[in-house]
Image (cartoon, rainbow, N blue to C red):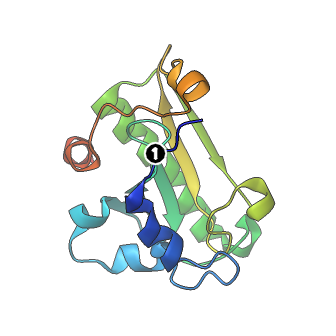
Amino acid sequence: MPYLHPYWRLNYVEKNDPETGENSPFKDIPNTKDEKAVHLLYRGSHSYLVMNKFPYNPGHLLAVPYNEVDALEKLNKEERADLFDTIIKGQEILTEAMHPQGFNTGFNFGCAAGAGIPKHIHCHIVPRWNGDSNFMPVIGETRILPAALDTLWERLREFV
């Protein structure tokens, strides 16, 4: 099996402690002044949209509440409503900018379910196109993304 060395992930791996949630990037992202540097697209009243630095597909977004909680029921009604409005906003932005034919949208709660930062929930919004999954992840164990994050951020930002 060939090995890929995504050296850029080391900062994420070393910075975040999934057990404690310390140094969670989700706490830092909304405090930045340079939105492009962190690929922050949109700020709602209780949540925000950011591009996933480790995307499954081009345009993969995360809807993240400002309130750091590990379960939906820990958000108040206003926070839940805003989070779901933010998810819809993300789908609208992607629809306008990239014309996907569908979406995978969902949450991972807890480490066992794949949550990389289990202390801070977030919703994945993944645009999908017919035939977008090719042989590379299966045969080559490699994911191919045809767009750079910075270039795609600029394209998506036009539709916010």
- In terms of secondary structure, where does tag 1 sit? loop
Amino acid tagged 1: Pro
Q: Position of residue 52 (x, y in %)?
A: 44, 53
- The residue positioned 51% from the left and 49% from the top of the image is 87
Count of numbered circles on the image: 1
- The residue positioned 37% from the left and 60% from the top of the image is 8
The quarter holding residue 115 reads bottom right
Q: Residues within 10 Å of mark 1 (few under 14, many from 20)?
A: some
Q: Is residue 127 left or right of residue 156?
A: right
Q: Is residue 129 left or right of residue 114?
A: left
Relative to residue 20, is residue 49 depicted above or below? above
Name, please, the residue furthest toward the top: 131
In the image, 142 versus 82, the foreground residue is 142
In the image, 145 versus 101, the foreground residue is 145
Q: Position of residue 113 (x, y in %)?
A: 77, 55
In the image, 94 versus 25, the foreground residue is 25
Q: Position of residue 148 (x, y in %)?
A: 26, 43
Q: Which residue is mark 1?
A: 55
- The residue positioned 60% from the left and 35% from the top of the image is 1
- The residue positioned 51% from the left and 18% from the top of the image is 134
The quarter holding residue 100 reads top left
In the image, 112 versus 35, the foreground residue is 112
